[in-house]
Image: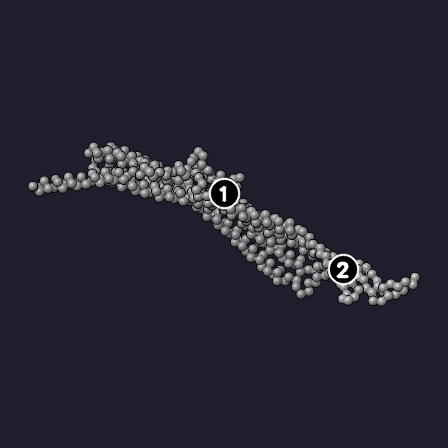
Amino acid sequence: MSNSNHRWIRLLMVLLVIAVGAECAWTQASPPASRPVVTATRYLDQANGMTADEAVRAALDSNGDLAALRNERDAARALIRQARLRANPSVDISGTRQIKGMDNSLMVEGMLPLELGGRRSARVKVAERELEIREKAVEERERMLAADVRIKFGESLAAAFKLGLADEILATAIEGLQLVHARVAEGKTAPLAENMTLVEVNRLRSTRETEAGRAEISLLELRNLLGLKPEEPLRIRGDFNNMIDALPPIADVTAVALLTRPDLAAMRSIEELSTAKIELAKADGRIDASLKTGYQRMRSGFPLNGFTNAGDLMPIEDLMHFFTFGVTLELPVRNRNQGMIEAAAADREAARNRREFGELVIRREIAVGYARFESTAKAMAIFRAGVREQANANLDVIRQTYELGSRDLVAYLVEQRRYIEIENEFIDLQMATYLARVEILRAANSAELIKK
């Protein structure tokens, strides 16, 4: 057999191996029928899904940590009622009896503390300041929880959009694979093109599984914020439209935040609490008094008999009744709560320093939020008009030229990958702009953050 015949036999064997490999790979290209395909509709429902505002309301109603803070606030209210109560009077009952004798006495004495020096009013002020701190803690947790929910909602929305994009691109790639397979079967295209398309389809499948896992994890974290169990159904709806709408002037937002931020208000309440503790310590260090009054009955006598005016014998004894009264004074001679006053004054100074630093932090948070929003909004606008739309048009042109035979498969696959990367980058920019806007709402304590 000649060398040319050997070459033809080897060539036929190579083509047979490629054809068999392509057929096996084509069989593996489709997922098993028994495995359900998870699509973006499992997480996204633009008709009946939960909106961001609804998610915030659900979290505020069912979050366990927030419920605990509200219970602590109720406890602080109860402590105010307790602080307003006056001191209880006390009653002392005692008696004496002579051993092997007839003398005995009974004494009943009552005492009423007066709480002089403004003790009660100072105690009430301390309880009221503590209630204010608890109330501001609830408002602060609501602010942070609402922002966390909106942030996680945006991340879940972006993950669902990326999963939807992966589903769409994968479906298009599978259609292309079917087309290439038909061309190979007709002999119009080399089997290598089918293998290259198959590799791209499997790569897209792998990417899609990754996006599905990210969407699932993001929705699980959102369920946790909403107080839902992991197995409870949850689908969301929304978009990233109107993200670049104009914001109020930064000076106005900063001024409102400095007045309304609950964490800063809590710092002011802590400062006022320290002042109230100083007044309470001074009041407790002043003179105090308690009124006392009582009754005493005393029976006393001798083991002898005497004669009455009528000449009758009777025991020598007498029964006496006494009314007692007095005042007990507490004299602050040694202890006037000097240490408590100094400690409360130091706490007040510390609270003042924290408040001043908190004001700087708020100004920085708002400035950073505005800077981040402006940069991401500009980047998103440029990307939408100058990158995304042009990339979509480029992909359409290359697809058409490939279908007409003017372009090879490699050029089309490269452009498709570039298009997928651009779409994912655009979703990331949308999410970044959305998150920057939420950060501004959180820093400014905007009413838009919690829509009740």
Q: Which residue is the site of mark 1?
A: 59
Mark 2 element type: strand
Mark 1 closeness class: few <14, some 14–19, many ≥20 residues within 10 Å? many
Mark 2 closeness class: few <14, some 14–19, many ≥20 residues within 10 Å? some
> Which label sits in the foreground, 2 or 1?
2
Identify the residue shown where x is 48% and y is 40%. Answer: 55
Q: Amino acid at mark 1?
A: Ala
Residue 435 in picture, x, y percent from top left = 44, 44
Q: Earlier in the sequence, mark 2 or mark 1?
A: 1
Q: Is residue 441 left or right of residue 42?
A: right
- Residue 235's quadrant in the figure? top left
Q: Amino acid at mark 2?
A: Met
Q: Are marks 2 and 1 in contact (CB under 8 Å)?
A: no
* Nearer-the-camera pick, 230 or 258: 230
Identify the residue shown where x is 80% and y is 64%. Answer: 102
Please, which residue is most extreme toward the left here? Answer: 1
Q: Is residue 174 left or right of residue 49?
A: left
Identify the residue shown where x is 87% and y is 63%. Answer: 314
Mark 1 element type: helix
Quarter of the image with the N terminus is top left
Q: Which residue is the site of mark 2?
A: 107
Q: Is residue 320 left or right of residue 175?
A: right
* Nearer-the-camera pick, 186 or 305: 305
